[in-house]
Image (cartoon, grey):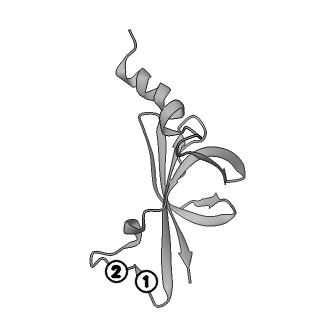
């Protein structure tokens, strides 16, 4: 009998990272990788609900979901290039076969 964790791992590519549904191929750190990028604007909002802008600086926050087999989790503070745009890693971790990377691009 298949365990729940084995079923989750099977679902990483067939469901969560299915290119016919949500996943797309993006260039991450120079490598083409199938992933889902969440550009949830709420991640860039402060407690007041207003955009986190300070003296003309705006932080563009992305959350990237990747099959954990594709790459090792980058360290917080390291550079993370997505489609030619440079970001800094805020946090990254692996959970149930998925690598989650939260990264910010500072725009001015």
Secondary structure of the residue carrying numbered label 1: strand
As displayed, is residue 58 above or below residue 24? below
Most extreme residue toward the top is 1
Instruction: Work out how far the residue at label 1 is from the one at label 2, CA to CA, in angstroms.
Output: 8 Å
Q: Position of residue 41 (x, y in %)?
A: 42, 68
Q: Which residue is mark 1?
A: 53
Contact (CB < 8 A) between labels 1 and 2? yes
As displayed, is residue 78 above or below residue 108? above
Q: Which residue is mark 2?
A: 50
Secondary structure of the residue carrying numbered label 2: loop
Residue 80 picture quarter: bottom right
The residue positioned 49% from the left and 34% from the top of the image is: 15
Locate the C terminus by quadrant.
Answer: bottom right
Neighbour tally class for label 1: few under 14, some 14-19, many 20 plus, Cα within 10 Å: some
As displayed, is residue 77 above or below residue 17? below
The residue positioned 65% from the left and 45% from the top of the image is: 33
Q: Position of residue 73 (x, y in %)?
A: 53, 46
Q: Position of residue 59 (x, y in %)?
A: 48, 74
């Amino acid at each position: 009998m298949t365990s729940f964790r084995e079923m989750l791992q099977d679902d990483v590519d067939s469901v969560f990272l299915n290119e016919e549904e949500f996943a797309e191929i993006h260039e991450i750190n120079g490598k083409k990788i199938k992933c889902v990028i969440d550009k949830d604007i709420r991640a860039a909002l402060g407690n007041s609900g207003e955009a986190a802008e300070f003296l003309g600086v705006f932080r563009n926050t992305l959350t990237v979901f990747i099959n954990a087999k594709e790459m090792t989790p980058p360290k917080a503070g390291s550079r993370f290039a997505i489609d030619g745009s440079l970001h800094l890693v805020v946090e990254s971790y692996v959970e149930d076969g998925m690598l989650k990377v939260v990264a910010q691009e500072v725009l001015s």
